[in-house]
Amino acid sequence: MVMWSKESRYTMLVKAYSADLFRFAMWLCRDRETAEDLVQETFTRAWRSLGDLRDEKAAKAWLFTTLRREHARLYERKRLEMADVPTENLAAPASDSYDTRTEAQVLRRALAELHEDYREPLLLQVLGGYSCAEIGEQLGLSPNAVMTRLFRARKKLLAVLGEDELTKVEEAHS
Amino acid sequence: MNCLDFRRHCLAEPASRASEFLEHRLHCRSCARFAERVLAFQRKLAEAMAVEPPADLEERILLRQSLHGRSRRRFLAVAASLVLVAGLGVAVVRQLGHDPLAEEVVGHVVERETEIGVDGPAAMDKVPGLLAHFGVRADGPLGEVVLARPCPVGKHMTAHLVVEEGGSEVDVFLIPDAPVKGRRRVEVRGHTGIIVPCPKGSMAIVSRDAEAPLEAIEQRMMERLSWI
C-alpha cells in the first residue's frame, strides 16, 4: 500500500476538488473573490484536519460541508447583498470556454433566482454528484424532503426554458 | 413503481441507480423516453453551472498553505532549537555523509515518475505564471517543458519543471527556502543530479537517466532565469 505524505495527500485533494468547490461557492455567494476566499478557507481547514480525512469519499463530503458552513458564517458576518449581484458576474471574464449560449444564460439566470432551499440541493447533486440520502445528511433533511426540493427545483427551471411539457405530463398523471 | 412514481423520482434524481427505478425504465418505453429528456436537461444544467475557476486557483491554494506552514515551522524550529541544542552535536556527527535535500527531491521525482507522469506540451503555458509565483522570470526558452507545477518537496514548496531533452526526462526544482553553500553532485536511489546555489535558495536538477545532459540544462537555467 502506498503511504502518501501529508503534503502529497493535500495536493491531490486540491487538484481533485478545488474547481468543483469554486463552482459550488460561486453559486452560493455569486462573487468570484468571495468564492475564492471560501475555497481557500476550506482548504486551510482541510490541512488542519487532514489526519482525520483518510477516506477520499469522506474527504469530498467534508470539503463541501465545510464550504457550506464557511459561507453561512460569512453571510452571517457580512450580510452580503448577494441578491443584487448581476447573474453575468457568474461568467469568467474573457473566457472562451464559457458557455454563453442564450439558453445557458437563461438557465443561469433562473438558477440564480431559485430559492436557496431548492438551489442548494441541486448544486450538491449536479456539482457534487451526491445522492438524495447524502444531500439529506449534509443539509439535515430526510431523503424524501430532498427529493421534493429537487423535484420542485427542476420543475421551476424546466418551466423557465419552456420545457414544462415534461412537468405537465407529470401533472396529467396526478 | 408506477409511471407517476417513476417520473417524480426521475425529476428529483435523474441518475438514480435504485433497482425499481432502473427496472421500470427498462420495461416502459414512454418513461424511458421521458428519462432521456430529463437527462438531456440535466446536461444543460451542468453546463450552466460550469463556472470557470481562476486559471491558477490550485497554485494559489498550495502556495498559501506553503507560506502559512513555513511561518509556523519557523516558530517551532526556534522553540525546538532552544531545547535540543545540547543534542545537536551528536546529530550532526551522525548525519555526516547524508544529504536530506537530495533524498527529498529524488523521493518526489520517483513519486512523480510512478504516479503522475507529465502533462505534455500544455505545460509550457504554465511556466511564466508558476515562475512568477516564486519570484523568478524566464528571459528565454527553457527547453521542452512537459510539466510545470508548484510541488511540496519535504518541508519545501518548490517550482517543479520537467524538461524533455535528448530523449530523457529531467526534473528541475527551484527551492527558494533551501539555500545551499556550494554546487554538488548527488547520486540517490538510481538517480543522478546536481544541486546548485541560486540568488534565492537553490536549484536541483535530477534525472533517472545517467546520460541526461544535466550540465547543459543547469547552464541554460542559470543563464535564462532571473530572480526578481
Image (cartoon, rainbow, N blue to C red):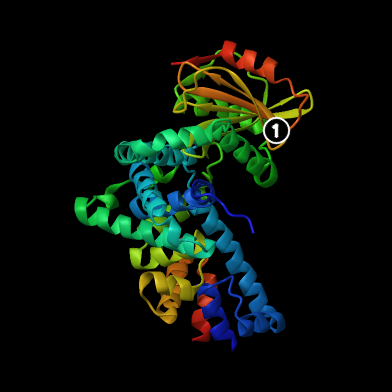
Return the residue found at the far bottom.
B2
Q: Residue at x 69, y 41 (%)?
A: B113
Can residue A123 be seen here? The reply is no
Which residue is tagged 1? B191
Q: Quadrant of residue B206?
A: top right
Q: Residue at x 44, y 70 (%)?
A: A135
Crowding at label 1, few (<14), some or many (≥20) Cα neighbours within 10 Å?
Answer: some
Looking at this view, is B128 or B72 the one in front? B72
Above or below, B69 relative to A28: above
Q: Residue at x 59, y 32 (%)?
A: B102
The C terminus of chain B - image quarter: top left
Chain to which the residue tagged by mark 1 belongs: B
Residue A98 location (% of width, % of height): 53, 42
Say how many tags the image has.
Answer: 1
Q: Residue at x 54, y 49 (%)?
A: A12
Above or below, B175 relative to B82: above
What kind of element bears circle 1?
strand
Can residue B151 be seen here? The reply is yes
Residue B60 location (% of width, % of height): 43, 37
Residue A163 location (% of width, % of height): 53, 65
Q: Horizontally, is B89 left or right of B174 in the view?
A: left
Looking at this view, is B29 or A139 the one in front? A139
Q: Amino acid at mark 1?
A: His
The N terminus of chain B - image quarter: bottom right
Return the residue found at the far top.
B223
Above or below, A2 relative to B189: below
Residue B129 location (% of width, % of height): 50, 27
Q: Horizontally, is B210 left or right of A48 in the view?
A: right
Looking at this view, is A23 or A55 the one in front? A55
Looking at this view, is B4 or A3 the one in front? A3
